[in-house]
Amino acid sequence: MADRLRVHSPIDGREVADLPLADASEVGRALARARAAAGPWAATPLAERRALLASAVDAFVSRSDEIAREITLQMGRPLRSSPGEVGGFEERARAMLGLAEEALRDVDPGGKDGFRRFVRRDPLGVVLTIAPWNYPYLTAVNSVVPALAAGNTVLLRHSSQTPLCAERMAEAFEAAGLPSGVFQAVHCSHGQAERMIRSPEVDFVAFTGSVDGGRAVQRAASERFIATGLELGGKDPAYVRADAAVAESAVALVDGAFFNSGQSCCGIERIYVHRDVYPEFLEAFVEEVRGYRLGDPLDPETTLGPMVRGSAADFVREQTQQALAAGATAHIDPAAFAADAPGTPYLAPQVLTDVDHGMRVMHEETFGPLVGIMQVSDDDEAVQRMNDSDYGLTASVWTSDADAALALGARVATGTWFMNRCDVLDPMLAWTGVKDSGRGCTLSRVGYESLTRPKSYHLRIAFP
């Protein structure tokens, strides 16, 4: 009998999914189906592909309430926030479908007597998307929908914590009438996922996850001449300048740091504040954090749910204790959050000051409800601190001076530079990272480039 995937909720340990894991023969058949479907799907006119995919989005959104509740049950996000992911999935999917015609249009280099010349963007063939649990739909949609729109077939291997998300996507595509083999959800072990990466049937791998996971994907793919898109970790910084709207910046940055219990690749983990506004900012920030309510995420009053598992919460506790032992100051009393319990996924938010870059909390990805705050004397020190990291996914500046924001953005090594906002994606802009935050790009028209290959047509119409 095949092994099974059993998912237990971080809320209370209840079993929320029990699905069969594909063995080697089942993975092989899925790969064969994807390859067989690739040619006919690529030959399907773009307008028809877009219409089918738009119908799939409609089918998905029609189940919003059910899907939002499943997100909460599988990974613990407060139910009051989970519907936002369904809305984000729809926004990104429709944006990418809207961009498809422009992004996939032939490139005309200009006229040349006696010749017809253009560059066409052909689909790669079979795309393997490996998606994580923390934003189970928002991470998957970034590659799945544009890959399908571009004429690729897709295999989705979702996190073992959120497999029902892959099931719901498969059901939506089936309801829309996508041909068999064009989209498949495959639940399998890490070993079988590696086998898919190494398989000659797979032409591209889109991976979102940890740095170590990205390295494993890259090693497996390196034996073949295929590309990978890797969205990995983050240690995203914010800089609050002396001319910032302090109260408003504090509220927004608390949300950026603690939404989803801090389990966001682009969540705020380091804050640098100009010394002139540091006392005011810190007071406003801590006061906002104290207003959070930690507890059962199914309770509509809960604003901070459990982390995905107890071991993840213990990792954050270790970072906190190391910082405190090295001289950091904690501003939040965990006892004020009744649900906080060591060894469990329920972890109170924490704000640390008197920190430095020798502490793990300021250089090692936390991925939890913990943030370190440091004073800086000027823009130059802020830039130096922001760049002092192995990561570079997003960074933000909080200021009333847009020209200064642009000038600072040119100096910070990051994939996305924000002014007066953070922890958000605009599907019309490229989503990318530098350093250990990954390689490649999703979203925007640029996101289509990695999911297609250029093919040049050089036609001589007549001899001289």
Image (cartoon, rainbow, N blue to C red):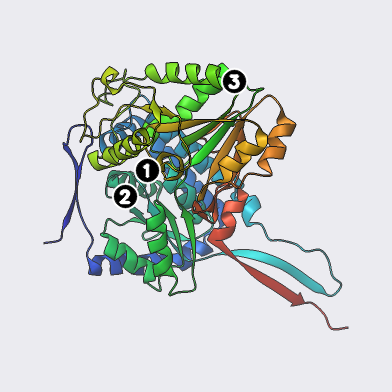
Q: Would residue 238 be found to the left or right of residue 264 on screen?
A: right
Name the kind of residue labelled 3 in the image. Answer: Val
Q: Nearer the viewer, mark 1 or mark 3?
A: 3
The label shown at residue 277 is 3
Res 274 seen here? yes
Q: Nearer the viewer, residue 404 or 454?
A: 404
What amino acid type is highlighted by mark number 2?
A: Ser
In the rendered view, would you say 211 is above or below 94? below
- Residue named by callout 2: 159
**Quadrant for the N terminus in the image:** bottom left
Residue 350 picture quarter = top left
Q: Which quarter of the picture shows residue 121? A: bottom right
Residue in front for this viewpoint, 4 or 322: 322
Element type where label 1 sits in the image = loop
- Decide which of tag 3 and tag 2 comes sooner along the chain: 2
Q: CA distance from mark 1 to mark 3?
A: 38 Å
Going from the N terminus, do you reach mark 2 or mark 1 first? Answer: 1
Q: Residues within 10 Å of mark 1 (few under 14, many from 20)?
A: many
